[in-house]
Image (cartoon, rainbow, N blue to C red):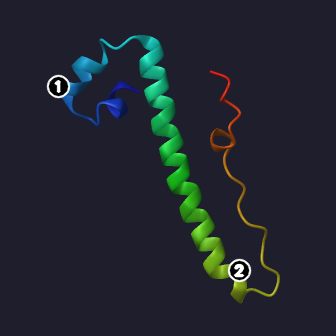
């Protein structure tokens, strides 16, 4: 988790280690949301490009739970 928050930069990782736990967890959650958003956008894009050319197109991909707002009770 620390490496990801620091962008794999050793000097920044030393600073991240001094963050309060709550701030580190919120930053990590934000990072995971951003990654999930990118992956979901790519999945929808592929689906949208292929669906019109299929006889029985599958349903569009469902968004991951982290993007559905279940954690908005902060």
Determine which residue is flagged by label 2.
51
Question: Residue 14 appears at what percent x and percent y?
Answer: 23, 18
Q: Of the numbered discs in the image, which one, if any, rests on residue 35?
A: none
**For the C terminus, which image quadrant?**
top right
Question: Residue 10 appears at what percent x and percent y?
Answer: 19, 27
Question: Residue 21 appears at what percent x and percent y?
Answer: 44, 12
Identify the secondary structure beneath mark 1.
helix
Q: Nearer the viewer, residue 1 or 65?
A: 65
**For the N terminus, which image quadrant?**
top left
Answer with left or right where residue 57 lies relative to residue 20.
Answer: right
Question: Residue 53 appears at what percent x and percent y?
Answer: 70, 88
Vertical position of residue 48 compared to residue 63: above or below: below
Residue shown at 48% from the left, 14% from the top: 22
Q: Of the numbered discs in the image, which one, if any, rests on residue 11?
A: 1
Q: Quadrant of residue 11?
A: top left
Identify the secondary structure beneath mark 2.
helix
Residue shown at 62% from the left, 66% from the top: 44
Q: Are the residues flagged by discs 1 and 2 in contact, CB closer than 8 Å?
A: no
């Amino acid at each position: 988790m620390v490496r990801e928050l620091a962008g794999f930069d050793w000097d920044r990782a030393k600073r991240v280690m001094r963050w309060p736990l709550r701030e580190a967890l919120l930053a990590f959650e934000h990072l995971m949301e951003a990654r999930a958003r990118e992956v979901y956008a790519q999945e929808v894009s592929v689906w949208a490009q292929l669906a019109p050319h299929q006889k029985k197109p599958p349903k569009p991909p469902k968004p991951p739970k982290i993007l559905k707002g279940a954690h908005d009770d902060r």
